[in-house]
Image (cartoon, grey):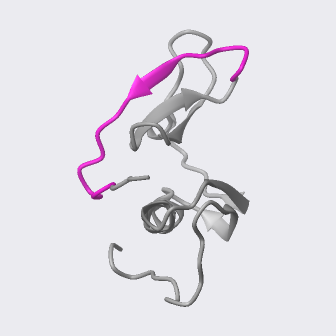
Amino acid sequence: MLGCFGIKKDIDVRNKNILLVDDIITDGATLTVISDELFKLGVKSIVWLTFAKTHHILSEDFYICEKCKNYLSFRFNTKDGNWFLGCTNYPTCTQTYNVFLPDYKYVYSK
């Protein structure tokens, strides 16, 4: 999916707050790749809005917080440009897990 998305050269997104809208989030690849491209162009922040999420029948398809047993979701650390799993019960539970996603090249620079 890398290289599939771009932005017109005459649009300046530096220091902008962006709302990305997608109809369905499956594995987050579309939003992730677009977010990476926008961060490389100097975007200040990105919020994802989706209207549906695919549901997996097998419970092992979900990541569970060992501390509070809630689901984990992928988050992006804008300070170091790395993805991590964060508890969906945040800020009550601040448990995080570092992850390595070999399928994507994540690039972040200010």
Residue name at image x 60 percent, y 71 percent? 13
Quadrant location of residue 82?
top left
Residue 63 rendering spot, x and y as whole percentages: 48, 31
Q: Is residue 45 above or below residue 43?
A: above
Check residue 58 for magenta coloring: no
Check residue 94 for magenta coloring: yes
Farthest-out residue, top: 67
Residue 98 rendering spot, x and y as whole percentages: 37, 28
Chief secondary structure of the magenta span?
A: loop
Residue name at image x 49 percent, y 89 percent? 9
Farthest-out residue, left: 102
Which region is colored magenta? 90-106
Q: Is residue 11 above or below residue 17?
A: below
| Relative horizontal placement of residue 3, taking residue 91 as reference (left or right) | left
Q: Is residue 17 above or below residue 73?
A: below
Residue 92 rendering spot, x and y as whole percentages: 73, 14
Residue 17 rendering spot, x and y as whole percentages: 69, 59
Quadrant location of residue 25?
bottom right
Quadrant location, the N terminus: bottom left
Image label count: 0
Quadrant location of residue 5?
bottom left
Residue name at image x 33 percent, y 79 percent? 3
Relative depth, front residue between 47 and 13: 13
| Relative horizontal placement of residue 105, taking residue 81 as reference (left or right) | left
